[in-house]
Structure formats: C-alpha cells, structure tokens
Image: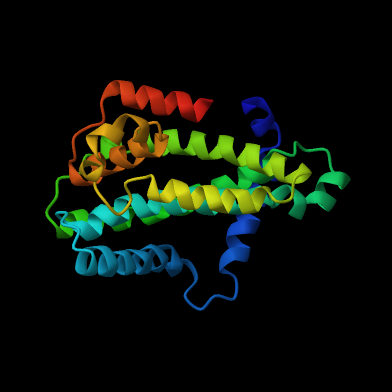
Amino acid sequence: MLKRIYRYRDVLRFLVVKDIKSTYRNSILGYFWLILSPLCMMLVFYAVFSIVVKIQVKHYPLFLLSALLPWQFLTNSLSRSTSSLIEYAPVLKASSFPREYIPFSVVLVYFIQLLLSLPLLFLFSIFYHVRVFPWILPVPLILQFILVTGLSFFFSSLNVFYRDAGVILNFLLLLWFYATPVFYPLSYVPPSFLRLYCLNPMVYVVSAYRTAFLGNPVPPPFSLLYATGMSIF
C-alpha cells in the first residue's frame, strides 16, 4: 500500500488539492469555514445540552469542541468517500491508478481540515487556563486516521455493488454519534452498560483528545491497544 502511495503520489496530491480548492471556491468566507463550522455546532450543542438539558461539565465549550472536531472528520470523510468511487467512475475507467486512491484522497482532505482546525482547541485551552498535553495528540490522530481510512475503503467498495450503502451508513453514523461521549461525559454511562459501551473504539479516541486538551485521565493502555486493533482491523 505504501509503495503504491509513493508511486502515484502526484495523482494523490492532485486529487487532494483539487478537492480542497473546489470545496471553498466561490465561497465568501472561504477557509474561515474550517473554524466557523465547528464553532456554530458547538454553540448549538452548548445551548441545548448545557442551558436546556443542564448537563454539568467543566469548560463545556472546550469539552464539546474536543469531540466535535474529530467527529466531523469521521462523518464528513465517510459520507463523502462512500459515493466517491461512483462519482469518479469515468476517471477510473480511463486510467490505471488504484481505485482506493479515490476514497483515500477524501479522507486526506478532511484530515488536513482537522489538523488546520486544531489551533481552535489550543485557543480555548488558553482561554480556560487549561494545561495542554500536545505530545498525547498524535495518538488519537493516528488511530482515528487509520480507523476512518479502513471504513472509507469498506463503504466505498460496498456502495459500488449496493447503492443503499450510503443510507445504511447515515443511520449507523447517527447511532454511533449517540453511542460516543461527544456531548456527555463518560461518567454518565451506567456501570452495568459500560463494558458493552466501551466496545466502541471512538470512546477511546475521543477520550485521548480530551486528555490532550482538558487534562482528563489518560485512557488505560489496554483500551488504546483495543482501539488500535479495531482501527487496523
């Protein structure tokens, strides 16, 4: 896989740059949407779950953003990559580069967007005077990148044969969202349900992001090993 990536690196670079430029072309705010989009989502979640539902979490805006940014990376990557092979079918028929480059380029685009939006978390950490642990950050970034890449390959291939794969994915993403501690802390999960709940690899990924930006307890080593295994699988 790595050899093929290097061999067709120019094609991959072209696909990524083309996608990024086309996303923000003719947009008034342009790349500012990388910051505005998660901020708007955070404000909505803050209004609903902190003011209305009364979820009590310290530094709740930072708590939300530390999960919303990686969650956006996951959902945007999977939603776009699932239909990518169909979208690029004429190009694939006329060329010989590996077809997995198409969904992989989509994942790379949103991964770059995630990296570019991370300074927002650092700014919120400074605002709340929270100690940041940046050396932890590569752990969730790498784990999530592997996980999202593998899922994008699976769903994009499945969608070639079964066009309702995208509908199924949207339903699964909705369930997955509520089964991940994005807007509520892990302590809200009943102890009797915790073992089953923690089969979700995104639990550990989100927890690791919050360790980096909120100083939350570091996920146990075995949990990170489990998340790594799930990502590779």
Give the quadrant of the N terminus: top right
Task: Point out residue 130 in the picture as x, y percentages from the top left corner.
Answer: 14, 50
Question: Residue extending furthest right?
Answer: 94
Task: Point out residue 224 in the picture as x, y percentages from the top left corner.
Answer: 34, 27
Horizontal side, residue 218 vs residue 18: left or right = left
Task: Point out residue 47 in the picture as x, y percentages from the top left corner.
Answer: 26, 70
Marks counted in the figure total 0
| Residue 112 visible in the displayed image | no
Residue found 40% across the figure and 39% down from its top: 202
Residue found 62% across the figure and 46% down from its top: 105
Q: As displayed, is residue 80 above or below residue 228?
A: below
Q: As displayed, is residue 202 above or below residue 71?
A: above
**Picture quadrant where residue 150 is located:** top right
Task: Point out residue 109 in the picture as x, y percentages from the top left corner.
Answer: 55, 51
Horizontal side, residue 161 vs residue 4: left or right = right
Check the image and tell me how it is coloured. Answer: rainbow
